[in-house]
Amino acid sequence: MTVQVTPLHDRVLVRRLEEKETAKGGIIIPDTAKEKPQEGEVMAVGAGKIEEGKRIPLDIKTGDRILFGKYTGSDITIDDQEYLILREEEILAKVSGIAKAASGKK
């Protein structure tokens, strides 16, 4: 899929990653009881913010998995797909393969 949206300055376009529909005990969680996931994949990034006449590039790049706050960003819909646009400062962390594996071993 090619995204035709390019965020400006220090903004990032994120696609939320879906959570599992069943709990560990096998209980199916209905859509109305689910919270929106706070983990996503970066689809596009802006060029960076300008400070003192110099452009500062973002630490995040396309394809990174990130964690963000529950009430951050702006929801948008493109081609029936929901995305989130947020500033780089609203991103809490990058999730690497090691952190993902460690969190899944509970």
Image (tube, helix red, strand yellow):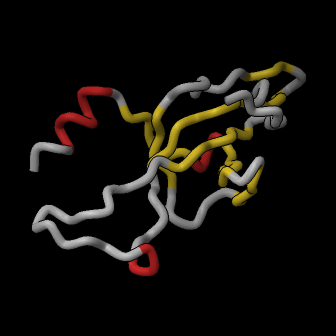
Q: Residue at x 51, y 58 (%)?
A: 69
* Residue 86, horizontal then vertical, whole percent: 68, 49
In the displayed structure, 106 sits above or below 21; it is above
- Point 73% across, 40% down: residue: 11
Name the residue nearer the viewer: 17 or 81.
81
> Residue drawn 46% across and 55% down?
38
Q: Position of residue 42 (x, y in %)?
A: 58, 35
Outermost right residue: 53
Q: Going 60% across and 25% down the picture, which residue do you hit?
A: 62
94 vs 3, left or right, is left
For the view shown, which residue lies furthest in the bottom direction?
32
Find residue 82 and report its image quarter.
bottom right
Q: Is residue 15 above or below residue 50?
A: below
Q: Position of residue 99 (x, y in %)?
A: 26, 34
The quadrant the N terminus occupies is top right
Could you tell me how many numbered marks the image carries?
Answer: 0
Which is nearer the eye, 1 or 6?
1
Q: As drawn, is 56 to the left or to the right of 22?
A: right
In the visual, does 36 lie left or right of 83?
left
Percent position (x, y) of residue 60? Answer: 58, 28
Q: Name the quadrant containing residue 31.
A: bottom left
